[in-house]
Image (tube, rainbow, N blue to C red):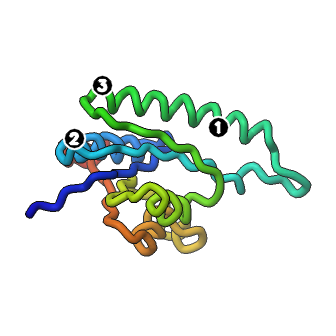
Amino acid sequence: MLQQYKRIMVAVDGSNEAELAFQKAVNVAKRNQAELLLVHIIDTRAFQTITSFDTVLAEQATEMAKESLKEYAASANEQGLATVETVIEYGSPKGIIAKQIPEERQIDLIMLGATGLNAVERLFIGSVSEYVIRHASCDVLIVRTDTENHLPE
């Protein structure tokens, strides 16, 4: 029997790498007649100051994420996907993408864009994709190429 994915999650953040992952996730979801979950994580650590959490910046990030997810969902629907959901979460992207959402939503495939970090940045902060590969309990596909399997220019 062929492996079939039923619930596919793709993390999108507006980067070119995330766009490649989104396009491939739509294709995989269509081939598998799967549900697609579009996820955007707002890293709240980026909005913390020494004294407080900057709510204005967080609210702006949330509005931008909502608009971006709305556009991604519309694009997936236009390409023929019937079931597309969106989720915005707050916190550290690594744990949320690797564990929290997959467990809550019974995800069986996580698709991520390849990291844009260089070797030194990975050494100090680590990449989200590297963490997800090591800690997710479902399959993980790291996307490096476009839908024609060509490296982006």
Q: Amino acid at mark 3?
A: Glu
x, y percentage for residue 139?
31, 65
From the image, tell me which residue sits under label 1: 62
| Rendering coords of residue 57 (x, y %) | 75, 39
Q: Nearer the viewer, mark 1 or mark 2?
A: 2
Q: Please provide percent x and percent y for residue 132.
A: 45, 66
Between the C-alphas of marks 1 and 2, the distance is 28 Å
Identify the residue position indicated by label 3 in the image: 78
Q: Earlier in the sequence, mark 3 or mark 1?
A: 1
| Label 3 element class | helix
Q: Residue at x 28, y 52 (%)?
A: 6
Q: Which mark is residue 124?
A: none
Q: CA distance from mark 3 to mark 1?
A: 24 Å
Of callouts 1 and 2, the N-terminal one:
2
Mark 1: few, some, or many residues within 10 Å (few <14, many ≥20)? some
Instruction: Please name the amino acid that badge 2 sits on.
Output: Lys
Which residue ends up furthest to the right in the rendered image? 51
Dot 3 alpha-carbon crowd within 10 angstroms: few under 14, some 14 to 19, many 20 or more: few
Q: Are marks 1 and 2 in contact (CB under 8 Å)?
A: no
